[in-house]
Image (tube, rainbow, N blue to C red):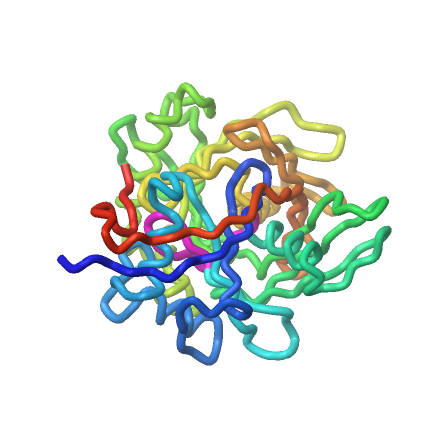
Amino acid sequence: MPPVTVPPVRTTDYHAAGEPFRIVDLTRDPVVAVPGDTVAERCATAIGPGGSATAPRRGPLDDVRRLLAREPRGHAGMYGGFVVPPDDDGAHFGVLFWHKDGYSTACGHGTMALGAWAVDTGRVAAPDDGDAQVRIDVPSGRVTATVHRGGGRTTGITFRNVPARVGARKVPVATSAGVAEVDLAHAGACYASVAARDLGLEVSREALPALVRAGREIRAALAGHPATWHPGGALLSGVYGVILHEEMPDTPFGPHQRNATVFADGQVDRSPCGSGTSARLALLAQDGRLGPGEDLLHESVTGTVFTGRMLPGSVTEVTGTAYRTGEHTFLSDPYDPLGTGFAL
């Protein structure tokens, strides 16, 4: 096979609650063209004809994704986004979310990181004290990152998602650990939720291999389930992530849960998962466990937290933090036998 040559790629890296987000600004540094009139069309272009979100067709853009997400430049938990033009003047920019296996239609932690990045780079003006709104077009619609500022620095970001809806409740799914009752909710992407204890598991770092195995089994078992279909079409349909959760003692402000979100092909979210938190909020609200003015304290398997709440119209907000971790220029040596890298 002839060597793959990728031009130098400049990135700015952040993490939101421990989950990485590698930003490539194709509007300022067009490493490769991404045809399309909307972000959703550009996402379909990135996936390629005959490909899928987790098995995209090879092409110049996907070579860049592989270079940045896979080892030795990335790792099995890598995540990022290509900044592209917005759908119209109502948003500041658009983004195509990617991970080591392909692309996703929603990403709450990435939206938080992009809000911080937009303010840090001056793309969106922000006060020293107060809030700045960053409007972003993503494949699932338009979302907003409200960047909270105090003393001249960013103190937090609130991600307002597209409306969330419940797809199905108590769907029986057979796994190697037993039959689980799974709830399905759409919140920019489709998430399957299951109580870890129903599988004899706890949400802990020690249990991660078993949690990942269960997540992969549940996702595979629900492939093609009608409740995973989204009216927006195939791009938004199908289970993207599996949230294995456990109850913690309630706080004075509402419920408290810990979760491990397993997405794509066994990737584990280091954060509590932003869009996954939105899915949990929709389910908790339907159960009557999350009332007006109450918050969900949502904890990740690493111990980091997001705080989420329901708004009228099935809209959710999730608040967290994001921090810049570095700026990089990644190179591809045409004589490197590893090419765009590998995934273990």
Q: Nearer the viewer, residue 60 or 315?
A: 60
**Residue at far top of view:** 206
Residue at screen point 72% across, 45% down: 156
Q: Is residue 166 left or right of residue 135?
A: left
- Residue 340 in percent (x, y) is at 29, 51
Residue segment shown in magenta: 97-109
Q: Is residue 77 left or right of residue 148?
A: left
- Residue 107 in percent (x, y) is at 51, 53
- Residue 219 in percent (x, y) is at 32, 44
Quarter of the picture holding the C terminus: top left
Q: Is residue 98 magenta?
A: yes
Q: Nearer the viewer, residue 342 or 178?
A: 342
Residue 132 visible in the shown view: yes
- Residue 96 in percent (x, y) is at 46, 62
Residue at screen point 46% across, 33% down: 260
Q: Nearer the viewer, residue 50 or 113?
A: 113
Residue 172 visible in the shown view: no
Residue at screen point 64% across, 23% down: 249
Q: Is residue 12 above or below residue 259?
A: below
Quarter of the picture holding the N terminus: bottom left
Q: Is residue 176 magenta?
A: no
Residue at screen point 25% across, 59% down: 4
**Residue at far left of view:** 1
Q: Is residue 282 above or below residue 247?
A: below
